[in-house]
Image (cartoon, rainbow, N blue to C red):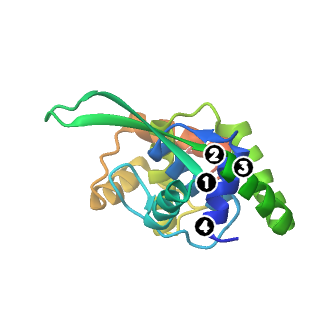
C-alpha cells in the first residue's frame, strides 16, 4: 500500500470526510505510527510533523477528482492575510477507487481499518490542536529514541525549541493525554 492508497482508504474509514489539512496530516501521522508503517516522510514543521508526500498525494487526489476540496474563508490574521479552513471529502469516483483498493489490498486494508477504529475510539474527539501537540511530543520522543524511556517536560521543551516548536506545560499535558489515549506512551509517576 503506497501513500496515495493509504490516504484514500483512510479518508473512507474516517467517514469519507476530514475537516482540515492539519487534522488530516496528524491523523495520517498517527495511523503510520499505529500501523508501524514505513516512514511517510514526516519532518518538523510549524504545526508539528508534516509530510510533503502526504500533502502531494492529497493534491494529486484532488486534481484527479478522487477527493473534493472545500475551502471556507473565516477572516484575516493579525497581518491581514486571509485565513481559510479546508475540508476534504471523497468524491463518488474516490469512493469507487477506495472500494477497488479494499478488494485489491484486502489484508493491508484490514490492518488500516483496525488502526482507524483504534484511533477513532481513542481520539475522535481530539481537535487538530491537541493532535498537533501530541504529534510534536511523539516526534520528539522518537528523535530521542525515548519511546518507553522517561522524558521530562524540560527535555521535551528543549528539543522542541530546536524545531522552533513552542511547547508550554498546558500543551504538554494535552499532548501526553492524547498519546496515552492512543496507547503510544505510558505515564509513570515519580516514586
Res. 42 in view: no
For label 3, the residue is 95
Q: Which residue occupies the foreground of this view, 106 or 154?
A: 106
Residue 144: image location, x then y, percent: 46, 67
Query: What is the quadrant of residue 66 in the picture?
Result: bottom right
In space, the residues marked 2 and 1 are separated at their CA atoms by: 5 Å
Residue 92: image location, x then y, percent: 69, 46
Q: Are marks 3 and 2 in contact (CB under 8 Å)?
A: yes
Q: Are marks 1 and 4 in contact (CB under 8 Å)?
A: no
For label 2, the residue is 91
- Mark 4 or 2: in front is 2
Find numbered disc 4 in the image and state the secondary structure of the residue it sits on. helix
Q: Is residue 117 above or below residue 36?
A: above
Classify residue 59 as left or right of residue 81: right
Q: Are marks 2 and 1 in contact (CB under 8 Å)?
A: yes
Query: Going 34% across and 39% down the picture, which residue do you hit?
Result: 168
Q: Sequence order check: which comes first, mark 2 or mark 1?
A: 1
Query: Going 35% across and 51% down the picture, which residue do you hit?
Result: 157
Q: Sequence order check: which comes first, mark 3 or mark 1?
A: 1
Residue 139: image location, x then y, percent: 48, 60
Q: Quadrant of the C terminus?
A: top right
In space, the residues marked 4 and 2 are separated at their CA atoms by: 18 Å
Find numbered disc 3 in the image and state the secondary structure of the residue it sits on. helix
Query: What is the quadrant of residue 119 in the picture?
Result: top right
- The numbered dot on residue 3 is 4
Classify residue 106 as left or right of residue 161: right
Q: Sequence order check: which comes first, mark 4 or mark 2?
A: 4
Query: What is the quadrant of residue 49 in the picture?
Result: bottom left
For label 1, the residue is 66
In space, the residues marked 3 and 1 are separated at their CA atoms by: 8 Å
Amino acid at each position: 500500500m503506497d501513500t496515495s492508497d493509504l490516504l484514500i482508504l483512510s479518508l473512507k474509514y474516517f467517514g469519507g470526510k476530514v475537516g482540515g489539512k492539519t487534522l488530516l496530516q496528524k491523523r495520517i501521522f498517527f495511523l503510520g505510527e499505529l500501523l508501524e508503517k514505513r516512514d511517510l516522510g514526516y519532518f518538523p514543521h510549524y504545526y508539528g510533523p508534516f509530510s510533503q508526500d502526504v500533502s502531494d498525494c492529497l493534491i494529486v487526489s484532488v486534481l484527479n477528482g478522487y477527493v473534493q476540496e472545500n475551502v471556507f474563508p473565516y477572516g484575516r490574521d493579525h497581518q491581514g492575510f486571509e485565513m481559510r479552513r479546508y475540508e476534504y471529502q471523497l468524491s463518488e469516483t474516490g469512493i469507487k477507487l477506495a472500494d477497488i483498493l479494499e478488494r485489491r489490498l484486502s489484508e493491508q486494508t484490514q490492518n488500516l481499518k483496525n488502526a482507524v477504529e483504534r484511533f477513532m475510539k481513542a481520539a475522535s474527539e481530539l481537535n487538530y490542536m491537541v493532535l498537533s501537540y501530541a504529534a510534536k511530543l511523539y516526534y520528539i520522543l522518537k528523535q530521542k529514541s525515548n519511546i518507553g524511556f522517561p522524558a521530562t517536560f524540560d527535555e521535551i521543551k528543549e528539543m522542541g525549541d530546536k524545531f522552533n516548536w513552542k511547547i508550554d506545560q498546558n500543551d504538554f499535558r494535552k499532548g501526553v493525554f492524547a498519546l496515552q489515549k492512543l496507547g503510544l506512551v505510558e505515564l509513570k509517576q515519580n516514586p
